[in-house]
Image (spheres, grey):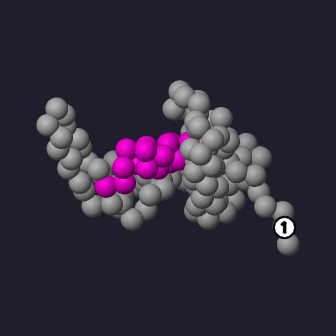
Amino acid sequence: MTAPLDPLIWIDDVEGRLGETLADSDRTQVDSFIAYASALLRAHRPDLDAAMLDGSLSAALVKGVTVSAVVRAWDAVRIGLRIKSEQFPEITTTYSDANPSLLFFTAEELASLSPTLGSSAGGAFSIVPG
């Protein structure tokens, strides 16, 4: 059995992006997002750690992508999972359908971590599914 891997980012990275220090109760929740985001990214790209070690994948890029996903999930929780907008002074709240994936990576984020990034797979008029 192998030892568990360290998370790809730390709470300090998230606080740095947010520009604030999180309360202890919030830190616990963000730590769980960090663990989940790290596991999701490693499941998407199993060679992630090896690619960062050999320099074929930028650790700063991985950090940025992971922090973005965690901040996106944290913002959704902090604002309210289904709240789309609020208006004042008359209190009006608009709700939207909840995203089934609270923590997710965008197609662009995953593409930036792809080992084929920068390769020319097609011509000028190639269609990329997604």
Give the quarter of the image for residue 10.
top right
Quadrant where the N terminus sits is bottom right
Q: Work out whether residue 39 or residue 52 is closer to the camera in this orientation and state it.
A: 39
Instruction: State the image coordinates of residue 124 (x, y, percent, origin top left).
Output: 33, 48
- Residue displayed at 18% across by 40% down: 91
- Write down the residue under mark 1: 2
Instruction: State the image coordinates of residue 69 (x, y, percent, origin top left).
Output: 50, 48
Instruction: State the image coordinates of residue 92 (x, y, percent, origin top left).
Output: 17, 44
* 110 with respect to 2 (left or right): left
Amino acid type, callout 1: Thr
Q: Is residue 71 magenta?
A: yes
Start and end of the magenta stretch? 66-82
- Residue displayed at 84% across by 67% down: 2
Q: Is residue 88 magenta?
A: no
Q: Residues within 10 Å of mark 1 (few under 14, many from 20)?
A: few
Q: Work out whether residue 52 or residue 123 is closer to the camera in this orientation and state it.
A: 52
Residue furthest out toward the left: 90
